[in-house]
Image (cartoon, rainbow, N blue to C red):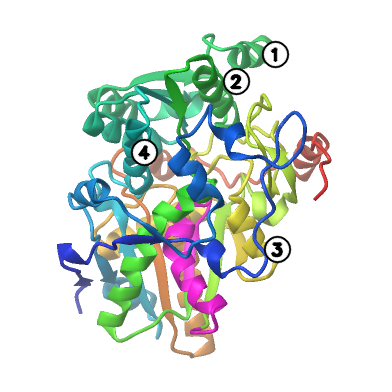
Amino acid sequence: MSTVKFLLPEDRIPTAWYNIQADLKEGAAPARHPGTHQPLGPDDLAPLFPMALIMQEVSRDQQIEIPEEVREAYRQWRPTPLYRARQLEKALDTPAKIYYKYEGVSPTGSHKPNTAVPQVFYNKQEGIKRLTTETGAGQWGSSLAMAGSMFGVEVEVYMVRASYDLKPYRRGMMETFGASVIPSPSDRTDAGKAILADAPDSPGSLGIAISEAVEMAVKDPGAHYALGSVLNHVMVHQSVIGLEALEQMEMTGDYPDVIVGATGGGSNFAGIAFPFIGRKLRGERDVRVVAVEPAACPSITKGSFAYDYGDTAHLTPLLKMHTLGSTFIPPSIHAGGLRYHGMSPLVSHLHNINVIEATNYNQMETFTAGIQFAKAEGIIPAPEANHAVVGAITEALRAKEEGTEKTILFNLCGHGHFDMQSYLDFMAGKLHAYEYPESEIAMALAGLPGVQD
């Protein structure tokens, strides 16, 4: 039995994104001003984002039209393929059917261009000439750099120091597209200088890098800030993944009993899961949904559901989310794209109302699963994607133990071609099963702002 691929024709790229807020009886709590703690209005966000994205952030419309210019850019890699992993099923000797949506076919090798392209497009429409952003593993930074080159917008990327050092080829990709890449924390910003004064050897974090990118955007009236995960409009853009998967699953004659997604800030998880969850919320079709996060950065499984800052310097709005505390600095694990202290407010809200489940695995478990998947399916996953792989394998083995047939769908959000050092380190025995100490999490959570609904 060979792996089977299900393809949609180019003209089946969705014409509208899906917005899960339309199907929630009670929406996620509103973002609040970092100074006044009052609910944010559009004018509060205008220094950071174009008005089109601000309106998408608060929209309750179920469908949001995809501009034709964005669909034209999408045509370079969308629709992405859906595979049935028959070889993996055989290796696991499971009665389960395993399907995966493969976002690694994008030009930058991950799902991130799905939101990078529209974000740059809307900023270009508003006359913005420069965008600042942060990146962890580099998938987001390289995607925004690519989109910037498409539309002629300058891009400045603050890359988490640990990833800057571990992943030079991602940095090279960003610079090839014309972006400037700065290791974070840096001495260019007040936020970076403050961190370096206390910890000159800081490995950085996404929270710190966000602070630096936001600070630089606010200082320049011709610049805006772009975020690759967490916010509602990013979840909307990524829904193109699940919308395609819905149609592709119809081609297979199957429907997922369980959907598994890696979760760091929530974007690729939302992309594959939200359109299916929408059906569940509307009473059309039930499905179990499992969010998988790293044991070293377990925001859903060990964090608090509370208002918190999105960055370390407290420049960003307060978001009601699962958080480990804005001062939390996770260890330098190889899944750099999942090293964020908070979770998307929409993903957090769905977990809080028991629509989704969450679990976590350490990096030894995720790399073991990734290698098993690569040997069976011929694709080496990114370290972040390995979290979805281990979650899917766990579900398949559970079906084997129970003797039940089950259909599993997960999002293989990117390939690991720029992450081979992490695989070499794993095979050389240089990695360990790091789980963040409860005492460190408690210390970070002690600094929550204490804002109530």
Mark 3 vs mark 4, CA separation in Å? 32 Å
- Quick check: marks 2 and 1 in contact, CB under 8 Å? yes
Horizontal side of residue 84 vs 57, given as left or right: left
In the image: residue 246, left or right of residue 282? left
Quarter where residue 206 is shown: top right
Mark 3 vs mark 1, foreground winner is 3
Q: Earlier in the sequence, mark 3 or mark 2?
A: 2
Determine whether label 2 and label 4 are within 8 Å by CB.
Answer: no
Circles 3, 1 touching at the beta carbon (< 8 Å): no
Q: Compared to 117, does 185 lie above or below?
A: above
Mark with earlier residue (3, 4): 4
Q: Residues within 10 Å of mark 4 (few under 14, many from 20)?
A: some
Where does residue 146 sit, x and y in percent of width and height?
A: 27, 34
- Residue at left 24%, top 62%? 13
- Tell me if label 3 and label 2 are in contact, CB under 8 Å: no
Q: Residue at position x 29%, y 30% from top?
A: 148
Position in image of residue 292 (x %, y %): 55, 59
What span is in magenta?
259-285
How far is the residue under mark 3 from the one under mark 1? 36 Å
Report the Cα–Cα distance between label 2 and label 1: 9 Å
- The three-letter code of the residue at mark 3 reads Asn
- Along the line of sight, the residue nearer the viewer: 159 or 85: 159
Q: Secondary structure at mark 4?
A: helix
Which residue corresponds to mark 2? 202
**Which residue is label 1 attached to?**
198
Q: Which mark is residue 122?
A: 4
The residue under label 4 is which amino acid type? Tyr
> Which residue is label 3 attached to?
352
Residue at screen point 47% across, 81% down: 257
The percent position of residue 372, horizontal first and vertical second, equals 36, 61
